[in-house]
Amino acid sequence: MTPWFTDQEVGWAGAIVGTSVGMLGGLYGCLCGLLIPKVKARRLIEFVGWTGASIGGVALMFGFIALAKGQPFGVWWIGLNTGIVTAPLFTVFNLWLIPKLYAQAEARKLDAAQIRAS
C-alpha cells in the first residue's frame, strides 16, 4: 500500500496539528481562568471545549483508519496521539470540571451578595 503522506508531510502535519491543538487548549484555559470566576460566557467555554473534543474524536478516527489500512507509523501516530490526548481531556473538562467550577463560582457570588446584604 502506498503511504497517504510522505515523511516530510507527516512532519509538517504533526507540527501544525500539535500547535493548533495546543493553542486551542491554551485558549480554553485562558477563557476558563478569566471568565468562570466572573460566572460569564459559559456557552462560549463549553463550545470551545466541545470543539476540542470533536477535533480529538476526528483525529482518533483518522488514526484508527490509517492503522487499519496499514499506513506507516508516522501517518497513524499523529491521529492516535492527538485523539488519545485531546478527546478525553476536553470531554472530561466539559462534562465534569467546568460545571463544578461554575457551581462553585455561583455559590461564591451568592455568598458575597448575602454578606453585602447583611
Image: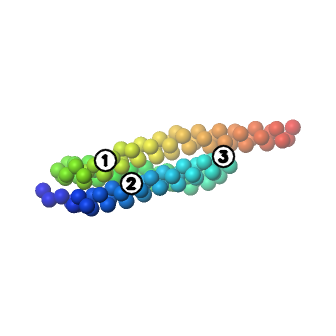
Coordinates of residue 51 in the picture (x, y in percent): 46, 54
* For residue 23, side relative to residue 9 (left or right): right
Specify the amino acid type for callout 3.
Answer: Pro
Under tag 1, what secondary structure?
helix
- Residue under label 1: 80
Q: Which mark is residue 18?
A: 2
Confirm whether residue 61 shows in the render.
no
At 62% from the left and 43% from the top, the residue drawn is 102
Specify the amino acid type for callout 1.
Answer: Leu
Q: Which mark is residue 29?
A: none
- Residue under label 3: 37
**Which quadrant of the rendered structure holds the C terminus?**
top right
Q: Quadrant of the rendered structure where residue 88 is?
A: top left
Taking depth in this image into account, of 14 and 57 the one nearest to the observer is 14
Confirm whether residue 72 shows in the render.
yes
* For residue 81, side relative to residue 88 (left or right): left
Coordinates of residue 97 in the picture (x, y in percent): 54, 40
